Every structure is written in C-alpha cells, then in structure tokens.
Amino acid sequence: MSVFALLDPAVHLAHDAVAALAAFLPTALAVVVFTLCVRLALHPLARAAARGHKAQARLAPRIAELRRKHAAQPEKLQSALAELYRAERVSPVAGCLPALAQAPFFSVMYRLFTTPDDLLHHTVFGVPLGLHVGAAHGQGQLLVFGLLYAALAGVGFLSFRSARRSVTDPTAPGAALMPYLSFGTVLFAALVPLAAGIYLLTTTAWSVAERAWLHRGSRPRQPLAVQPAR
C-alpha cells in the first residue's frame, strides 16, 4: 500500500468539501475558497512559527559571533550554541516544527488536486482543471497556463524579497541560497495539473501576505561588525 494511500480518507473529505462549494461556485473558485479556509485554520501554527523566527532573530547577532569565534572548532560551536539556546530558553527548531505540522494538510491538498477525479473534469476559461501544460494545445489554453506561471513568478518574487529581509543569520550554511527557493513553485507548477497550480498560487500568495502581517514592523537585527584589533 502506498504511503499516500493513508491520506485517502482525508482526501475524500476534502473532495466532498470542494464539491459542495462547487455546487454554487465555479470549481476553480471553489478550489481557491477551500484552500483559503484550510490556510485560515492553520494560521495558529503560522503564528507559532513566527514567534520562533522572532526568537531566532533576537539571538542572530550572538549566534553569528559564536560562528566566527568557533569557525575552526565545530564541536565547540555546537556546544556554545546549545548553551545559548538553553540560557535563553529558545528552541533552535522553534520556527520549523509548526511548518512541519502543516505538511500532512498540504499533502492532502496536493493529492486532491493531482489525483484524477470528477472535479478535475471541470474547466476554467475552457481549460480542464486536470490538464497538464504539456498536453495543452491552442493559444487559449497556453495563455491560461502562461498567466498562472506569471502570477506564481510575481508571488515568488515577493516571497524572495521577504525571505532575503528575514534572514536572521547570514553566516549560516545555505542562508544565501534559501531565498531563491521561493521561485521553486513556478517549476513545480509545470509538473502538476492546472488545479494544483491554482492551489499553489493561492497558498503561496497567502503565505506571503501572512508572513508580511506577522512580521510587520520588525526587521532582523544585523550582526555587529567585529572591530579589528589594534
């Protein structure tokens, strides 16, 4: 049995909810509304992640200083970081656990919008929701996919800017690369049906707006420059 098959009961419930919305809304709009409802229900987890991120930002200058001080001594660095987190009563994964808790919900949404069912036979501007871009034909269908990818790229750019501003420790491994992952949704959308692309656009737009709201008025403190010895 596939691991994803374990999600089937939840997928069926999600399908019934979208189908109920589609009874009085266009199916594509029903996908958007259902996605927004799920994200609203998960908002408390996002708030917990934001609190963890702010705690990390508060400690960022001290973490960067420890990384410089123990750059050649990984064991001492890990020990010093553990002591700092313990003294400040901050978990190093405080901002990650809420995001991981959301993963099962997103897996259900992904399976719902990529598994063939009666919902995916509906159309948006004449394009079936179950259609992949590789099977699109005619200018009309290609235009719909092009608009979707352009919107995803625009949201990805906003997410990229936000991610660059929110880097708490520029010296951490991969810190410079992480913001560029914001554009990954455009590439991923090219591999899934139109319905999943609409879901991706909705959920990433929510994420950008939610992050801006939760981090409004705050900017990460920049590590203090080390003065050269005289």
Image (spheres, helix red, strand yellow):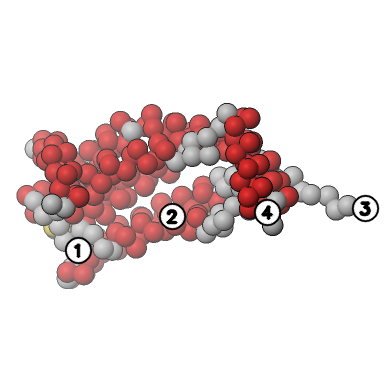
- Residue located at (60% from left, 39% from top): 82
Judging depth in this view, the residue of 109 and 82 nearest the camera is 82
Under tag 3, what secondary structure? loop
- Residue behind mark 1: 132
Residue 139, located in which quarter of the rendered image?
bottom left
Horizontal and vertical percent for residue 6?
A: 17, 44
Under mark 1, the amino acid is His
Horizontal and vertical percent for residue 1?
A: 13, 52
Q: Residues within 10 Å of mark 4 (few under 14, many from 20)?
A: few
Q: CA distance from mark 4 to mark 2?
A: 33 Å
Residue 98, located in which quarter of the rendered image?
top left
Horizontal and vertical percent for residue 122?
A: 10, 52
- Any mark on residue 214, and which? none
- Residue behind mark 4: 73
Q: Residues within 10 Å of mark 3 (few under 14, many from 20)?
A: few
Under mark 2, the amino acid is Ser
Judging depth in this view, the residue of 105 and 186 nearest the camera is 105
Q: Earlier in the sequence, mark 4 or mark 1?
A: 4
Q: Earlier in the sequence, mark 1 or mark 3?
A: 1
The answer to whether residue 26 of the structure is visible from this angle is no
